[in-house]
Amino acid sequence: IAMSWPFCSVCGTILDPPDGEMVKCTHCPFSCKFTDIMAPEVITKSAPTTKPAWVADEGKDEGSAGKEMVKHATIEENCPRCNHPELYFYTMQLRSVDEGSTVFYECPECAYKFSQNN
């Protein structure tokens, strides 16, 4: 619960802070004591909402052995740890623009992760 700043009861203009005890409207001749103004209470309520589908799906591409990876591309290359013939991969530009990107790999079989700078 909060108090909003008062508006002029005659013309609806927002009232400036008082000069001393009196509040004067800048748009019409209305004036009164600041203590006589009843500012309306403003009550704000919020409630949790369900997450959108695109938020709920986040994390599917995080990867671990046995989990489905739907967002990463695959490459036919052997895993250095378990020799599985296919790896998931994605790239990110972690260094300056004039340098190559970094390729991240993950094995869908054993969840081994490694990266390589291009």
Image (cartoon, rainbow, N blue to C red):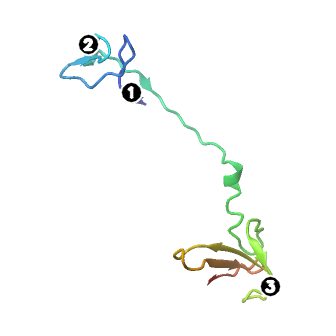
User: Disc 1 to disc 3, how far (Cα)?
Assistant: 65 Å
Which element is circle 2 on? Answer: strand
Examine the image and state in which quarter residue 15 appears. Answer: top left
Residue 50 as seen in the image, left or right of residue 78:
left
Residue 114 as seen in the image, left or right of residue 75:
left
> Residue 69, relative to residue 28: is it above or below?
below
Which element is circle 1 on? Answer: loop
Q: Earlier in the sequence, mark 3 or mark 2?
A: 2
Q: Earlier in the sequence, mark 1 or mark 3?
A: 1
Residue 64 as seen in the image, left or right of residue 42:
right
Picture disc at residue 84 = 3
Task: State yes or no: discs 1 and 3 in contact (Cβ < 8 Å).
Answer: no
Disc 1 target residue: 4
The amino acid type of the residue labelled 2 equals: Cys
> Residue 78, relative to residue 21: is it above or below?
below
Which element is circle 3 on? Answer: loop
Residue at the image point whose x is 47% and y is 29% from the top: 43
Crowdedness of circle 3 by 10 Å Cα count: few (<14), some, many (20+)? some
> Residue 80, relative to residue 53: is it above or below?
below
Q: Whole-percent x and y of residue 38?
A: 35, 17
Crowdedness of circle 2 by 10 Å Cα count: few (<14), some, many (20+)? some
The amino acid type of the residue labelled 3 equals: His
Q: Whole-percent x and y of residue 41?
A: 42, 24
Residue at the image point whose x is 70% and y is 66% from the top: 61
Residue at the image point whose x is 72% and y is 89% from the top: 80
Query: Which sits in the foreground, 67 or 20?
Result: 20
Q: Whole-percent x and y of residue 117?
A: 60, 83
Q: Earlier in the sequence, mark 2 or mark 1?
A: 1
Disc 2 target residue: 32
Crowdedness of circle 1 by 10 Å Cα count: few (<14), some, many (20+)? few
User: Disc 2 to disc 1, how far (Cα)?
Assistant: 18 Å
Examine the image and state in which quarter residue 99 appears. Answer: bottom right
